[in-house]
Image (cartoon, grey):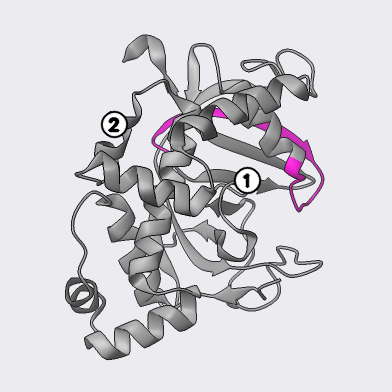
């Protein structure tokens, strides 16, 4: 188990830029310059914060995005490799097999076969009643966040404890999961914990970001957290077929009083 760590503001901002332009070439010098470090200091700081080198982070992010897209669409594997920044399909095939132990084609077919063996029907909610998962469009909202990665036993989202400041607790708090727990190793799953952005610019380790601004499959969860893994499984399987299909992007959690609303990004295939 990798203990939960809070990621420095400069690394959060840099990784957000990398993720937004994942198909581009990111050299160590380029990343260090954008983060405001010397290459040596950046490499050391990044590895301490993220648990891996900058090069390993980008490679893992591309391959895990590919794994998600393999299940979220029927796009040909060669096209998918180009979409995530691999100019040569052979390179993608070799690195995907090294990461997941099987070819991309076998990975896709194995997951579909596994769902069938488990009695899960793509496009249907495997545990809930019809209508519990609803599709909604969320307007873009400005929030400020602290980001963590890793895991620890009994971790709860407590706004009264560090790294939260002394501000009043708002009516709604936000959790943003940037990686897919079923694909990303647990110690590397990144989560943002946020609150509405106030009148001033985020500071003191807080990073301003926008969430929403798209279509989401949403499910209400009674309680105060953490969200059970079965909730993500329900949304995941439901979005594997039909009009609304899973799209890469952060999963949002809106913490209300005694209720959490989980929003998974989806795309409308009828409007593509």
| Residue 165 quadrant | bottom right
Q: Secondary structure at mark 1?
A: loop
Disc assigned to residue 266: none
| Residue 52 quadrant | bottom left
Q: Which residues make up the magenta segment?
A: 211-229
Does residue 235 appear in this view? yes
Q: In the visual, does 115 lie left or right of 272?
A: right
225 drawn magenta: yes
Give 124 or 142, whichever is nearer the viewer: 124
Q: Which residue is found at the position 30% from the left and 38% from the top?
A: 81
| Residue 34 quadrant | bottom left
User: Percent from the top left, x then y, of residue 203?
Assistant: 40, 76
Relative vertical location of residue 186 with respect to residue 142 in this rendering, above or below: below
Q: In the visual, does 271 lie left or right of 8?
A: left
Q: Secondary structure at mark 2?
A: helix
First of labels 2, 1 by sequence position: 2
| Residue position marked by numbered label 2 in the rendering | 78
Does residue 164 appear in this view? no
């Amino acid at each position: 188990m990798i203990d939960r760590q809070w990621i420095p503001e400069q690394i959060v901002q840099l990784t957000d830029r990398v993720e937004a332009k994942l198909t581009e070439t990111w050299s160590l010098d380029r990343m260090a310059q954008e983060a405001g470090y010397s290459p040596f200091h950046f490499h050391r700081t990044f590895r301490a914060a993220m648990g891996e080198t900058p090069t390993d982070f980008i490679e893992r992010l591309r391959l895990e995005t590919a794994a998600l897209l393999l299940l979220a669409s029927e796009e040909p594997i060669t096209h998918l490799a180009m979409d995530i920044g691999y100019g040569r399909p052979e390179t993608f095939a070799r690195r995907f097999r090294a990461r997941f132990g099987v070819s991309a084609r076998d990975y896709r077919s194995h997951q579909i076969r596994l769902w069938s063996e488990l009695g899960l029907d793509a496009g249907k909610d495997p545990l809930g009643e019809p209508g519990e998962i609803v599709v909604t469009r969320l307007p873009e909202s400005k929030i400020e966040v602290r980001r963590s990665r890793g895991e620890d036993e009994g971790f709860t989202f407590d706004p009264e404890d560090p790294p939260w400041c002394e501000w009043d607790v708002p009516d709604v708090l936000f959790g943003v999961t940037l990686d897919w727990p079923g694909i990303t190793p647990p110690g590397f799953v990144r989560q943002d914990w946020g609150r509405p952005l106030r009148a001033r610019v985020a500071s003191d380790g807080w990073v301003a970001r926008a969430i929403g601004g798209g279509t989401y499959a949403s499910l209400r969860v009674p309680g105060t957290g953490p969200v059970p893994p079965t909730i993500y499984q329900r949304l995941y399987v439901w979005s594997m077929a039909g009009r609304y299909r899973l799209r890469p992007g952060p999963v949002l959690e809106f913490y209300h009083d005694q209720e959490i609303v989980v929003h998974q990004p989806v795309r409308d295939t009828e409007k593509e």
